[in-house]
Image: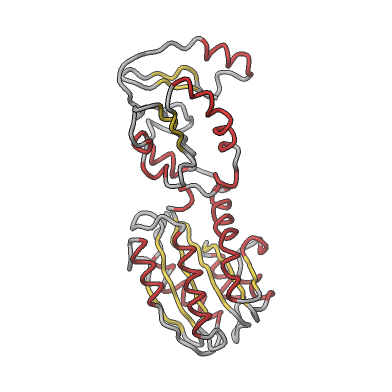
Amino acid sequence: MGVHESGDNPATQFNLKTHMNSRDLKTAIEKITQRGGLSNVDESFVMFEPLEGEPEVQDLIFIGFHIFTLTVLRLSKNPCQCVINAVCRTNGFYSFNVQSWLGLSKTMQPLVKRVCDTDRLACSKTCLNSADIGFVIDGSSSVGTGNFRTVLQFVANISKEFEISDTDTRIGAVQYTYEQRLEFGFDKYSTKPDILNAIKRVGYWSGGTSTGAAIHYALEQLFKKSKPNKRKLMILITDGRSYDDVRIPAMAAHQKGVITYAIGVAWAAQDELEVIATHPARDHSFFVDEFDNLYKSNPRIIQNICTEFNAQPRN
């Protein structure tokens, strides 16, 4: 634990490595004196070694920090102003409004509970603003018009979870049968409303099921244009066994660093889903017995995307 006191004359009282037991920590906290001055949190993040220089809040959020804000009385009408609006886009999970200084003690247990809520922390903004996500959608005849609209709603619901812009997460989509069609690329739309409208406008194609060719097409037409600093996620939805081989295209996707999720419906072949999915397959392949149950896999897909992101080492 470390303490930094902000203000006109900020100072780190002690850093994360100074005190190794609760007794010394308590004594150090009791010795802290008020420095006075105006509020200024811009310099409050210098204690986090081995970060170089004086990192900004945006940098900390991007590399995996979770920033909680406690706002007392009228010091800020909007707690997000204390840090950055992006921190507060999770239904107030990261912010507390306290009516008086005496009321601070009442926030202790709720704050500790949230800090320990690994499920909620896993899906913070950190993992939702740094990916290029390509949907590969089965438009074969067995799907049917009504079910195809259900698939598009599934795609829209996943897309809604992400922060979409040119610099945050970008969305692209391919539809396939025997042939393939680029519905829109990563650079086509840069706002969430535009993405959702584009998904809604995708027309049902109808035809056969060549999933292997579709994966190869997506690598060439979508992911070749992915930004180098973005995670590459492919989410493939199919309702049947492919007429062509999926192994070689799937291996190519894995070798290119594309994290592949395989979503199977109805007559989809479990063995193919596991081949398509990134290892371990249990975290990247999903099966539902009918299209109306697709929505049930949404939370776990988002959770797995975030958990996997947060488990990656940071530079």
Q: Nearer the viewer, residue 213 or 89?
A: 89
Q: Residue at x 51, y 43 (%)?
A: 314
Q: Residue at x 42, y 47 (%)?
A: 89
Residue 145 drawn above or below residue 226 = below
Residue 178 drawn above or below residue 198 = below
Q: Position of residue 20 (x, y in %)?
A: 62, 20
Q: Position of residue 126 (x, y in %)?
A: 47, 47
Left or right of 212 in this view: 53:
left
Residue 27 drawn above or below residue 270 = above
* Quarter where residue 200 is shown: bottom left
* Quarter where residue 143 is shown: bottom right
Q: How is the image coloured?
A: secondary structure
Q: Nearer the viewer, residue 211 or 69?
A: 69
Q: Residue at x 43, y 23 (%)?
A: 100
* Quarter where residue 287 is shown: bottom right
Question: Which quadrant is the N terminus positioned in?
Answer: top right
Residue 273 drawn above or below residue 125 = below
Q: Position of residue 207 (x, y in %)?
A: 51, 90
Q: Nearer the viewer, residue 54 or 122?
A: 122
How many numbered tags mark residues here?
Answer: 0
Q: Position of residue 176 (x, y in %)?
A: 48, 82
